[in-house]
Image (tube, rainbow, N blue to C red):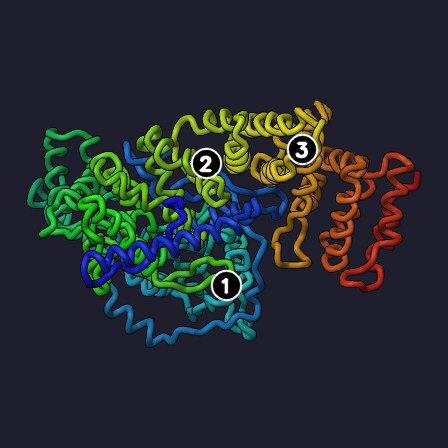
Amino acid sequence: MTQEAEHSGPASGGGGDQQSGEAAAADRTAAGAAGEESEERDQPQNAWAAQRDLIDHSPRTMRIGSRARFGGSYFGGDQNIGGDQHNVTGDVFMGGKTEIHQWSLAGHSLSAATSGEVPQRHLDRLADSFVADEETVENLLVRLRRDRVLVLSGARFTGRHTAALMLLRRLGATPVHILDRDSATPSALADGITAPADSQNSESQVRGYVLCDLATRRGSPLREPHLLAARSRLAEQDAYLVVTVGLTAVLEDVPCVVWQPPAAAEVLAAHLRTHTGEETAAELLELPAVAEFLGRSHQLREIASFADRLGKYAAGEATEDDVTGFSRESLENQVQEWFEEDEASIHLRDKAFLVALAAFDGGPYALTAELSDLLFRFLLKTENSARVPEVPVFGTHIGKRLQLARAEKYEDEEHTEWGPVTQQKARFVDERAPLVLLREVWTGHPSARPALVEWLRRLADDGRPLVRTRAASTVAVLARTDLPSAMALVIEPWATSNLFRHRLVAVNSLTLAHVIGTPNVPRILDGWSQSEDRRLRWVAARAYALIGPELPEQALAALRDAARRLYDDLDDPDDFDLEMVRELSAAVALLLLSPAHDQVLAELRRHLDDDLAVHSLTLGGFISACRRQEEENDRASRPLVLTWYADAATGGQEAAHGIPFLWRAVLGDRDTTGSALDVLADWVLIADRSEATEWALAALLPQLVTTPTEYQRLSHLLRTMPGADGAPRPRVADRLLTTLPPR
């Protein structure tokens, strides 16, 4: 029985050592049986679903964007990672800022959304008690006057809603309307801005709109085009809009102002005046490093120490680096305090919670607490292997735990296989804390490694995608800190496991490690892609599909080499690895639908006829890509490749030639003709429900006819294909038939 196959259960709360031992043995027996049953059911997760889980559940410091999407007149997808609003700096980090190009076409119109008017007396009452830094307010007003739309970001209960209303009041906006959040999506933001029925009688009035806590997710971020569309609609009405979002909102190229309560700045200013005097204090408060410091949550002792550091800087006794690095130093000192304190100050169970919170930052609190108790048991076992680990059933209150961790509780949606659900979550107030904390535990306290490794292996066996993904993200941080140890202790055992779920966690670990700047990951994958061990080749193929957009030529070369290995010996067809063929094709498809799509398409065309293995890999990957739609559960959703072609044809891009070229290849190959015709038939059915798809398909089909055989093949499909679910042949087939040039 493998250690990974065991399942955790509640610790024994009493009884003698013999009873505890018998109970533990029974648990192991039951866990072994469950593990064997689980191993029998183990199957590789679909590459697209695995990518979606990685996107949905990776932590905020390792965001890899949304699933690849098409939209507008260009193709967008996932690039590597930046943090939320701040990059982690110094040796904590992990990588510089990188733009994220992503969007979603999903959403619905807000034209019918409810819009409630805020009574003037309510605005006046708020104004009487509204307190804020006047300079900050004036700067926001300048931006709002200029741009007509302003995005305020901040934690809950920091006055964002009131600030939004007061900004509009200062502009003289009457009336002010609250837009319905439940009906709002980023892509339909402008549709909610509708003039009232009597707008012709109120042309001189400036109108105001507030949208509180706009819901975004990694597949549906708020993008710059959404704000530009909203600005145009606002200009038509002489109106202004303030959108408030949470700290974890998914924004792409959107200027965003973080709303901060004034207390910390007031404390810092008071301390600075005592150190340096009024004039110098005012100059110091204008430093960018001060703005960065105040943008984070610091204790009063840290604010006082920071004022002292600024005073030394003004006196020439400290450098600019001393000032800019103070915030990070404070965080590192806090983490060291947590793990250097004795049991009388911080219990081992609370230390386990801190580690779990670092791994599950921004995840459901109950899940974090549950898995922190599992880690606590492993830590107790490390301290005294002879003692049966016991976990108190009732322990520290959630508020006290989060206060100790300098974390916060909030409610947010969690993505599940059944759709989004609202859960109570917990996260560190400082987004850098998880990276600093995990680094400190791994490198500063090596005695904790056995327990931590055992815990991570158990997480990799969990049935919840979120848990497995966070196991991978945790290992990615450990690899960034100490690659050789992370590889030997965790990643390589997962990569060589016979269980697909373990190998998938290895894939995600290497992917996220690469994302945060860990060196040599492509080198590792190159070696594995040529390994004699098919398990390592599987991991390399999956990982290259995810990091390949950064290095498409290297990724495709590795995939071609892996494909050739499958064709080295065709004497025994029973030895042909069809499973690996599917994996390699899925990897090519993911790369085709990535931000590097043009380079990938060019590489596929260039090497199409290299040999049989590469030819089959290219055609299989292309067909797999053609099956993907913008929204998988929407029967009228546009095929991604078809939309890509339509945009390329409109813009005169090379893909307008490359896509038809590969289509003619898959239609003309006897091994792929049937699958290709099936995909085309599906596209025709989608075109019967979508005018945009029909126009795109009408533009593509003539490019697929260059010979009489090609004409006969396509015309036969359009003349004979059935409708959906046994319905008569769709009418759109007749219209598309007329687009085929006779041969």
| First in sequence: mark 3 vs mark 2 | 2
Image point 49% across, 39% down: which residue?
79
Q: CA distance from mark 3 to mark 2?
A: 23 Å
Figure check: 536 above or below 610: below
Instruction: Judge by depth and name the residue closer to the eye, 292 or 717.
Output: 717
Q: CA distance from mark 1 to mark 2?
A: 43 Å
Q: Secondary structure at mark 2?
A: helix
Which numbered circle lies on residue 495? Answer: 2
Which amino acid does the dot numbered 1 rest on?
Ala
Asked if disc 1 and disc 2 are in contact, CB closer than 8 Å, the reply is: no
Residue 272 visible at all: no
From the viewer's perspective, tell me whether residue 544 is left or right of residue 261.
Answer: right
Residue 62 locus on image (x, y percent): 40, 42
Which numbered circle lies on residue 184? Answer: 1
Residue 475 visible at all: yes
Which numbered circle lies on residue 617? Answer: 3
Instruction: Judge by depth and name the residue closer to the eye, 172 or 167.
Output: 167
Q: CA distance from mark 1 to mark 3?
A: 42 Å
